[in-house]
Every structure is written in C-alpha cells, then in structure tokens.
C-alpha cells in the first residue's frame, strides 16, 4: 500500500487520508474512500525498493510533491509537468498550531449560559423545485425567567412564581382542572351572568371589575335580602288573604246589640233583623256625630265582609225622610282584648253597600257615626240594616 505526502509541508500521510495531520492542507478533492481504493490498486514498487505513487490516467499528469520525489545530488530538481485540465485547486496556506490556537481564542466571546437551549431545527427533505412549509417543531418545556423551583403549570409543566394565578407561558389557570371544577360557582350565579364556560386564553380574559361594579353588586344583594325578609314576614298574611279571597261567604249573626241612644220604637236590634223596612236611629237631629251602635258575638269569629244599608228603607221615595251615614268608624275588639279601628266611607245612594272587613277572632264591633248625608234640624240619621259575612265553613248560622 502506497502513501502520499503533503504538498505543503511534506508530512507523511496514510492511504485514504483527506487532510494533513501537521498543517491541515487538503490532500485531494476526490472522495477519501475512492482515493484509498485508487491508491491501493495503482500502487507499484520501483526497482531498488523505492515506492512510487499511483498510476495516472491517460492524458493527465500528477503533481509530485517536492518531498516525495528527491532529485539526484548532482542535478537540480525538475519542475513537475502539469496540464491545464488537471490542475489542482489552490490550497489554503499552511498554519501552525500556535496560530490556530490564537485564532480560536479570538473567536471566543464570554457569554452567559442559556437558560434552556432550543432544540436544533431539523431540515426536512423536500422535492426538487417544490417549496414546502416548514414543519412545526415541538418546543421543549421552559420556565419563567428568574424562577427557580417554582410550582409547575398543570397544563404545560412550566415553572412559575408561587404568587401567579395564570401560567406565564400558556395563560391557563394554575389551579388546574380538578380544583377549577371543585370551585365551581352556584347554579343561580351561572344562570344570572352566563359565564359557565372554559377558562379564557391569553388575550381573551374578561375585563377587570371596578369598585363601582362591586358597589352595585352589594346593593342588589341587600335589596334581594330585604325582599326575602319582607316576604317571609308577610307570607302568612298573604296566604290567608288568598284563601279569604277565594273562600265562599256565609252570614254571621251576632247575639247581643247595644247603642248609645235609640229612638222610640227603633232600638238597635232592628239594624240586625235582616229586614230593610225597619231601622235604627239615635233620636238626635242633624248628623248624629258621635252616636254608635254595637254588635257582639257568642264566640271569636272571623269576618270577611260587612254590608251596611243606610236610611230608613231601600225605597227612593223615602230617601229624604232621614239623614244617611257618610263616614263610619268601626272599632273591632278581638278575643285577646285588643282593639283595631277602621274607617268606612259610604255612598250617598240607597241600597246595600258591601265593604271589605277582614278580621280574625272578633268578639264585638262598634260603629260610630262621624258624618252624614242630608243632615237637617228636622231629620235624624238612620241605618236600616248591618250584615256580617265570614267563611261559610267556619261560621254558625
């Protein structure tokens, strides 16, 4: 096997070697494996034991390095013959080891170590003449600058500061999916604001809540709480009123009757005898202000309505024979001894007039005349009939 010496420094080179070990000069431009095969096949030994180089192809000459072909002592070395077709390309100048070391040191620049080096981008094969888009590369998991040992993001694994609520890399909540579900808001809040959706990404987060919005929220909460308290307090009254509104009415008959004054042959009992042609009168002219008539019940009774028929009868030709009550004060006494006062306003016409009169546990009712229609010096106020009504299922006829 033949060897080839460097053309620059004359150092000995092994077969198949592409660069000189001493100076780094290129030994040949052909493939190293091809050169090794050519050199091994064409190597010959000259007479006398001298090793010669590989055979040359026809029509081409090979440049013989000075160190490889030593001229005789008594004659000058003959210049190698070359042709224009096989002239080798220029080779770089020889460089010593010290110069290479200095050049490498000048290229070194002190820089800080990278936090996390990006993975080298792989060059993807493409068809000739056909541009293809760069394939997406999977980026390695990084961490937030200046963070050492922070909690990792449950979505992407990036280390974050302990005080962060959203990841610095993917903007997902640091609480994670399980804790987010555990902290789910009540159903009534999700219905009111309609925010039952996934966590927003970066750039899609809701705007910050201002102080005014918090104030409005507290006012609305206080109003709702007040309404709930009022509803709870008045709920029994509302239920009772609804029941009374749809209840069937039945007459309630009192057992005792009293009056402050009574006209001759017209006592207080005639105002509760279910007859419209009999009447009660105090025997006092003008409006009869301050006169009263009272009815008592044998047991506590629930009253719903009262019907008052003013005048001496329901006939129109007897309208001017007496004065008629206008405003009447009703004082209601219950079974616990408490009293309640209500004012009833009657119309000037004749006939029965129904008024709402809801009371619970009533033992007596006193009607006091405050003013009258058609009052005159020769007339007295008169009431033809007073009737009480209560729930038909709880009254005694």
Image (cartoon, rainbow, N blue to C red):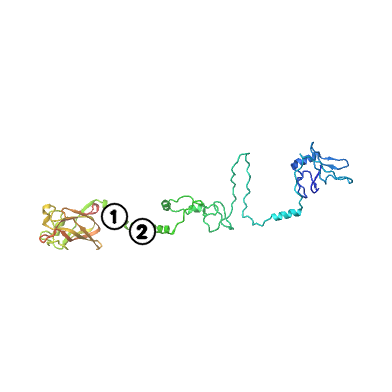
Could you tell which of marks 2 and 1 lies nearer the N-terminus? 2
Query: Residue at left 30%, top 56%?
Result: 237
Q: Which x, y percent locates residue 251?
A: 20, 53
> In this orientation, which residue lies closer to the viewer: 170 or 154?
170
Q: Which x, y percent locates residue 385?
A: 16, 55
> In this orientation, which residue lies closer to the viewer: 377 or 91?
91
> In this orientation, which residue lies closer to the viewer: 35 or 291?
35
Tag 1 residue: 240
Q: Which x, y percent locates residue 20?
A: 77, 48
Query: Residue at left 31%, top 57%?
Result: 234
Tag 2 residue: 226
Q: Kindly indicate whether the residue at mark 1 contacts the one at mark 2 (C-beta within 8 angstroms).
A: no
| Badge nearest the viewer, 2 or 1 | 2
Instruction: Residue 63: name its quadrant.
Output: top right
**Which label belongs to residue 119?**
none
Q: Which x, y percent locates residue 98?
A: 76, 55
The quarter in which the N terminus is drawn is: top right
């Amino acid at each position: 096997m033949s060897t080839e010496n460097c053309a620059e420094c004359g150092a000995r080179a092994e077969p198949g070697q592409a660069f000189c070990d001493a100076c780094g000069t290129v030994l040949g431009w052909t493939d190293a494996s091809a050169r090794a095969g050519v050199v091994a096949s064409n190597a010959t030994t000259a007479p006398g034991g001298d090793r010669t180089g590989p055979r040359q192809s026809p029509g081409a000459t090979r440049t013989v390095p000075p160190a490889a072909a030593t001229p005789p002592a008594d004659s000058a070395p003959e210049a190698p013959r070359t042709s224009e077709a096989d002239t080798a390309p220029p080779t770089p100048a020889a460089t010593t080891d010290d110069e290479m070391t200095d050049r490498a040191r000048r290229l070194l620049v002190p820089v800080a170590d990278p936090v996390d080096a990006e993975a080298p981008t792989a060059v993807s094969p493409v068809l000739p003449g056909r541009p293809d888009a760069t394939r997406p590369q999977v980026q390695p998991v990084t961490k937030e600058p200046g963070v050492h040992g922070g909690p990792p993001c449950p979505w992407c694994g990036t280390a974050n500061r302990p005080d962060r609520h959203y990841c610095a890399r993917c903007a997902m909540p640091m609480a994670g999916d399980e804790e987010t579900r555990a902290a789910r808001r009540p159903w009534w809040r999700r219905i009111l604001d309609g925010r039952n959706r996934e966590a927003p990404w970066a750039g899609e987060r809701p705007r910050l809540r201002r102080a005014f919005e918090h104030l409005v929220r507290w006012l609305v909460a206080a109003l709702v709480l007040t309404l709930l308290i009022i509803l709870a307090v008045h709920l029994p009254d509302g239920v009772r009123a609804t029941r009374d509104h749809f209840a069937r009415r039945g007459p309630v008959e009192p057992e005792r009757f009293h009056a402050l004054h009574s006209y001759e042959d017209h006592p207080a009992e005639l105002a509760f005898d279910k007859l419209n042609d009999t009447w009660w009168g105090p025997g006092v002219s003008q409006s009869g202000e301050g006169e009263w008539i009272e009815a008592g019940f044998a047991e506590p009774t629930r009253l719903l309505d009262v019907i008052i028929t003013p005048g001496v009868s329901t006939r129109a030709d007897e309208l001017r024979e007496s004065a008629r009550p206008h405003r009447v004060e009703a004082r209601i006494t219950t079974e616990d001894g408490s009293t309640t006062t209500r004012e009833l306003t009657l119309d000037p016409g004749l006939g029965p007039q129904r008024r709402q009169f809801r009371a619970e546990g009533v033992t007596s009712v006193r009607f006091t005349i405050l003013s009258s229609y058609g009052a005159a010096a020769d007339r007295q106020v008169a009431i033809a009939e007073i009737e009480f009504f209560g729930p038909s299922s709880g009254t005694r006829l």
